[in-house]
Amino acid sequence: MKPAPHLASGRRAEELALGVLTAAGLRLVTRNYRCPQGELDLVMEQGETLVMVEVRYRQDNRFGSAAETVGTRKQQKLLRAAQHFLLQDARWCRRPLRFDVVAVSDTAAGAITTDWIKDAFRAD
């Protein structure tokens, strides 16, 4: 059975984001971490820093860019999921933590673009 088109697009965007991040030297810790508080698309390491990555895909920007879809409510959900992740394994608790967004979009010319926003929001 084929996945729904929006799920397949999201999976492709996640694969593309993972490729960009690993090419930049980040190491994958886990992907699609699910808990009652939400989901973390990618959890990566960059040196000593633990990086929680939200991947967003938009086919077009008529209703805003992919990056613009990570509003305050989504940020809060990501923070709660990150807290859950950190509580599951004490080795991560003392590491610096960063939240990044990788926005993946289709262009009018049919190309795919990625915009990696490091430190997209703070866990204050």
Image (cartoon, helix red, strand yellow):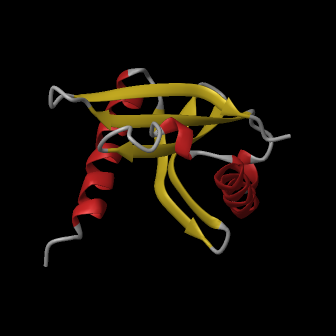
Q: Position of residue 36 (x, y in %)?
A: 65, 75
Residue 81, percent across and down?
A: 67, 60
Point 75% across, 33% down: residue: 96
Number of marks in the rendered image = 0
Q: Where does the image place residue 54, in percent across and percent down from the top left?
A: 52, 45
Residue 94 drawn at (x, y percent) = 80, 40
* Quadrant location of the C terminus in the rendered image: top right
Task: Say left or right for 114 vs 95.
Answer: left
At horizontal 64% and vertical 31% (from top left) the residue drawn is: 120
| Picture layout, residue 124 above or below residue 37 | above
Q: Which residue sits at x=68%, y=49%?
A: 75
| Quarter holding residue 65 | top left
Q: Residue furthest front?
A: 62
Above or below for 88 versus 54: below
**Residue nearest the observer in this picture, 121 or 49:** 121
Q: Quadrant of the N terminus?
A: bottom left
Residue 67 as seen in the image, left or right of residue 111:
right
Residue occupying the point 64% across, 54% down: 74
Locate residue 103: give its quadrant: top left
Q: Residue furthest top?
A: 24
Which residue is the extreme one toward the right? 124
